[in-house]
Image (tube, rainbow, N blue to C red):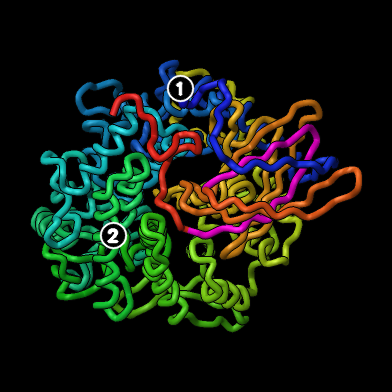
């Protein structure tokens, strides 16, 4: 049996439960919109390489490495949903080219915005400001999706193990991890080891941020030296003695120790586990995650954002628990740090099936809600920062954290957290759906929650329309871009996202979009095409998850082809971490329709879709019952990697 991604030979799985769709019906609107969206983006995506890249796949655009990878961050995922195989081929070409030209061994190009940020295929110390887990996570997304799309690529398996080794103390060239204290030695971990020295330009950005050098604009901060330096003057770097003092203090206080934001690293080690099943990666994820959970307990229920070189909270800050890089006092505290908390909780649950790890995230959501205030108009506001005067920067609570928690747990207590926020939300219409960029705060999750809560029945069509609107705008702009290569290079504008997958993830997979800054795929179900031996729905097939519960998922499948039978394998979870128990559906024959219930007790089952047939499946499920893996259904228990 061929097991490579591009096999055209059908695959078979002995003993798999198979169901046949029998209902002949016109396709619903959502199915047509879903296939139209897929088709549009399949047509649009090649323009990235045709117009904005060299033939070898290297983009003309020059910026930090993560920004190069981000251009194709979800192309592997799109392929794994059912898009044309060219999407995977092009994303591999572009990723490898971006890695190759960024190597610090050879100078490939000269540009003011370009720097050689790669050593041994992973981030080096050339740009520390782009090598913490906000940017590492963004850059890693494309690599994680290669495992979802094609887990048998030998060099990616090698890379997964190599990148993990850099972070868990196995690589002597990169002593990033301190196993004694269960911390990273610096918030910035690279293939050349931890960053303990700050250059002036990065230091200015970290302490002032994008908001400029006016100290009154505190939201621009990514870190602070408080309480050691309580008032940092605006022009501190213009005086050599003060500049040297601040640099030394920053290296001691901020760079010499770990931050909660580094929980994003758990995805990189989980990625290695999904390829290999090696328990050492699981042990590391649990050790590191539990370390931060212990610190929450030691800090009265609030996650401290910084520890010193011996793992003590606020070790260089006179015991102060806030102020670390991208921590509670940074201008994105309620965003970036929480992204990493989501990732850590999801990875620990995925690897163990232990819902107790979700307390890492749930406890911090409750911290925000426990310190919420109500505006005069009744709007519930939660703090997003903490500083010398306590909680501050109150805003309506974002949906991302709540949506990820509830999708992971399906627990009534988390449903109640969401409904509490909804009841106090007077300025947002949760049923309204509009186009949102791929990188957002979960703004598309309001409508999705309402759909599954029975309050937004047209949501699938709304989100697919919104995504089509965004994809079409990108397509038109690129199609009408007549600039020559020299102008494109001179302008150095970031190419757009030609592929949008957040809506498809929600509709087809029944899950929130993965955390953009380094989260692994979320999916209640996934699909495979046994006739083409590849992941994703077959041609002409549309899928919708129309029901979610703690022990059940509802799935609709539609074959839009009027002449061809399509076969689909449905898998339980993104990484077959769940277990199907039974499937219930309507069987239609000449005498009418009857309900059938078929026992499954497996990680996947098959559905035959004759032309123009549709079927709705009510599937029983035990969630997080299996060890996760990137393996495809026909791989068995071990991924057939050609060169181990």
Q: Nearer the viewer, residue 568 or 191?
A: 568
Is residue 435 shown to the viewer in this render?
Answer: yes
**Residue 471 located within the stretch drawn in magenta:** no
Q: Which residue is mark 1?
A: 53
Where is residue 103 shown, x and y percent of the image? 25, 27
Q: Is 2 rendered above or below residue 319? A: above
Question: Which element type, helix, strand or loop, lies under badge 1?
Answer: loop
Q: Is 273 rendered above or below residue 400? A: above
**Rendering quarter of residue 231:** bottom left
**Rendering quarter of residue 60:** top left
Name the residue furthest top: 55
Q: Residue at x 69, y 43 (%)?
A: 19
What's the CA distance linking mark 2 and mark 1?
41 Å
Q: Which residues are magenta?
A: 603-623
Where is residue 111 shown, x and y percent of the image? 32, 27
Q: Nearer the viewer, residue 67 or 140?
A: 140
Q: Is 427 rendered above or below residue 66? A: below
Evaluate if marks 2 and 1 touch, with contact meaning CB atoms under 8 Å apart: no
Q: Which residue is mark 2?
A: 286
Question: If the image is split into quadrants, where does the C terminus sit?
Answer: top left
Question: Which element type, helix, strand or loop, lies under badge 2?
Answer: helix
User: Is residue 181 found left or right of 384 in the rendered image?
Assistant: left
Magenta stretch, main secondary structure, is: strand
Q: Residue at x 52, y 72 (%)?
A: 414
Other residues around mark 1 within 10 Å, as few (<14) / some (14–19) / many (≥20): many
């Amino acid at each position: 049996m061929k097991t490579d991604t591009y096999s055209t030979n059908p695959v078979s799985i002995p003993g798999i439960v198979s169901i046949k769709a029998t209902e002949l019906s016109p396709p619903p609107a959502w199915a047509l919109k879903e296939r139209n969206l897929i088709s549009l983006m399949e047509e649009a995506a090649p323009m990235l390489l045709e117009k904005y890249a060299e033939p070898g796949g290297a983009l003309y655009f020059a910026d930090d490495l993560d920004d190069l990878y981000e251009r194709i961050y979800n192309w592997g995922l799109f392929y794994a949903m059912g898009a044309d195989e060219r999407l995977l081929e092009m994303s591999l070409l572009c990723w490898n080219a971006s890695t190759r030209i960024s190597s610090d061994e050879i100078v490939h190009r000269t540009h003011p915005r370009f720097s050689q940020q790669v050593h041994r295929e992973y981030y080096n110390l050339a740009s520390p400001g782009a090598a913490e887990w906000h940017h590492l996570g963004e850059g890693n997304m494309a690599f994680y999706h290669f495992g979802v799309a094609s887990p048998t690529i030998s060099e990616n398996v090698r890379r997964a193990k190599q990148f993990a080794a850099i972070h868990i103390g196995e690589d002597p060239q990169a002593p990033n991890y301190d196993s004694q204290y269960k911390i990273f030695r610096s918030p910035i971990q690279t293939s050349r080891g931890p960053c303990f020295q700050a250059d002036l330009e990065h230091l200015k950005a970290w302490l002032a941020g994008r908001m400029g050098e006016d100290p009154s604009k505190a939201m621009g901060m990514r870190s602070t030296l408080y309480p050691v330096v309580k008032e940092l003057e605006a022009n501190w770097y213009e005086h050599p003695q003060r500049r040297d003092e601040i640099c030394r203090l920053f290296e001691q206080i901020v760079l010499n120790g770990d931050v909660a934001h580094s929980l994003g690293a758990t995805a990189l080690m989980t990625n290695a586990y999904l390829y290999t099943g090696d328990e050492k990666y699981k042990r590391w994820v649990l050790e590191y995650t539990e370390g931060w959970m212990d610190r929450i307990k030691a800090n009265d229920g609030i996650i401290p954002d910084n520890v010193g070189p011996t793992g003590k909270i606020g070790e260089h800050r006179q015991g102060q628990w806030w102020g670390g890089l991208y921590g509670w006092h940074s201008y994105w505290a309620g965003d970036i740090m929480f992204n990493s908390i989501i990732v850590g909780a999801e990875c620990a649950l995925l690897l163990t099936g232990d819902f107790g790890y979700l307390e890492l995230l749930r406890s911090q959501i409750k911290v925000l809600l426990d310190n919420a205030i109500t505006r005069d108009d009744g709007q519930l506001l939660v703090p997003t920062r903490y500083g010398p005067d306590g909680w501050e920067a109150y805003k309506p609570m974002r949906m991302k954290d709540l949506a990820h928690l509830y999708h992971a747990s399906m627990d009534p207590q988390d449903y109640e957290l969401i409904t509490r926020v909804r009841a106090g939300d007077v300025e947002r219409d949760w049923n309204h759906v509009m186009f949102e960029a791929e990188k957002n705060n979960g703004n598309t999750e309001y409508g999705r929650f309402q759909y599954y809560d029975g309050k937004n029945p047209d949501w699938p069509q709304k989100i697919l329309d919104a995504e089509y609107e965004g994809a079409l705008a990108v397509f038109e702009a690129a199609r009408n871009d007549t600039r020559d290569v020299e102008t494109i290079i001179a302008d150095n504008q970031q190419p757009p996202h030609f592929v949008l997958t957040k809506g498809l993830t929600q509709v087809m997979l029944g899950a929130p979009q993965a955390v953009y800054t380094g989260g692994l795929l979320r999916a209640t179900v996934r699909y495979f095409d046994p006739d083409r031996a590849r992941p994703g729905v077959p041609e002409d097939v549309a899928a919708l998850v129309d029901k979610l519960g703690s022990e059940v998922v509802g799935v609709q499948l539609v074959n839009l082809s009027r002449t061809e039978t399509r076969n689909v394998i449905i898998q339980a979870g993104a990484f077959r971490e769940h277990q199907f128990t039974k499937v219930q559906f309507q069987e239609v024959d000449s005498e009418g329709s009857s309900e059938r219930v078929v026992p499954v007790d497996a990680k996947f089952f098959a559905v035959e879709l004759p032309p123009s047939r549709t079927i709705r499946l009510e599937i029983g499920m035990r969630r997080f019952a299996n060890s996760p893996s990137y393996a495809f259904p026909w791989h068995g228990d071990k991924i057939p990697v050609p060169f181990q």
